[in-house]
Image (cartoon, rainbow, N blue to C red):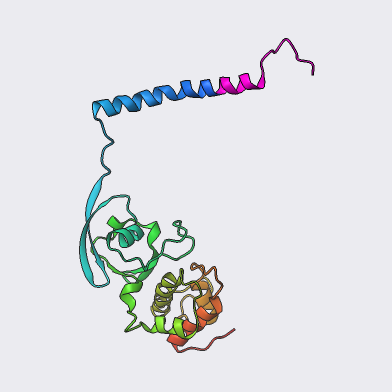
Amino acid sequence: MHHDETFPVSRRGVIAGGVASATLAAAPVAQAQTQDQVQGTTQPAPPTMPVTLKVNGRTTKLNVDTRTTLLDALRENLKLTGTKKGCDHGQCGACTVIVEGRRINSCLTLAVMHEGEEITTIEGLGTPEKLHAMQAAFVKHDGYQCGYCTPGQICSAVATLGEIKAGIPSHVTGDIAAQPSVTTDELRERMSGNICRCGAYSNIIDAIHDVAGTERTA
């Protein structure tokens, strides 16, 4: 093979040169890290803030990083792991809890924003010995498969019936000035923020109708 003498650099040489350049570029960073270690400097501690959370009827005082989400405070600080972390972006509904009677995605809100508010998680709705009516209906109608989304589904379902009872309209409510009804279309719309990757949607709707004492309309 003919080699062009005007560019007498081998492939091995190119690779060696690249490694040398990367090493030189990293040297100042490594030197700075070494100096920090010698001088004993450390990164400042993250800011924390006291917060009082009322969860499932129990008041707890915490001191948390101000960036801590309500979801992480429930799971990591209070060990209430029934509330699940799914997407952590407010897109799946697995972390749904009820705050002051309204359902929210606990991954999208900070713990320090809920000072003194009443928070209900799946653990606060019922126990294995004394199930909430919605929990019992999910069991009766097989409203779950893997079960990962189920806590959020149940909290959302309970709040959904509360919203309808309170007269809060949805995007499918025909007359927003009238009292909404517990119809299948209403339930599908209101529960649309809770994703079930197993596809148990039909059974979930049946369970909610059962609790509401209404019939499936479609």
Q: Position of residue 34 (x, y in %)?
A: 32, 26
Q: Quadrant of residue 62?
A: bottom left
Is 13 in the magenta? yes
Q: Position of residue 163 (x, y in %)?
A: 41, 75
Is residue 204 toward the left or the right of residue 36 in the image? right
Q: Nearer the viewer, residue 211 or 81?
A: 81
Q: Residue furthest top?
A: 6
Residue 81 makes an appearance in the image? yes
In the rendered view, tell whether residue 4 sits above or below residue 129: above
| Residue range corresponding to the magenta coloring | 1-18
In the rendered view, tell whether residue 80 sits above or below residue 185: above
Q: Who's the residue at 36% across and 82% down the image?
A: 132
Q: Who's the residue at 48% across and 63% down the image?
A: 92
Is 33 in the magenta? no
Q: Position of residue 111 (x, y in %)?
A: 30, 57
Q: Residue furthest right?
A: 1
Is residue 1 toward the left or the right of residue 169 in the image? right
In the rendered view, tell whether residue 113 sits above or below residue 168: above
Is residue 68 toward the left or the right of residue 1 in the image? left
Q: Quadrant of residue 167?
A: bottom left
Residue 175 makes an appearance in the image? no
Q: Nearer the viewer, residue 26 or 133?
A: 26
Q: In what quadrant of the picture does the N terminus appear?
A: top right
Q: Position of residue 168 (x, y in %)?
A: 42, 74
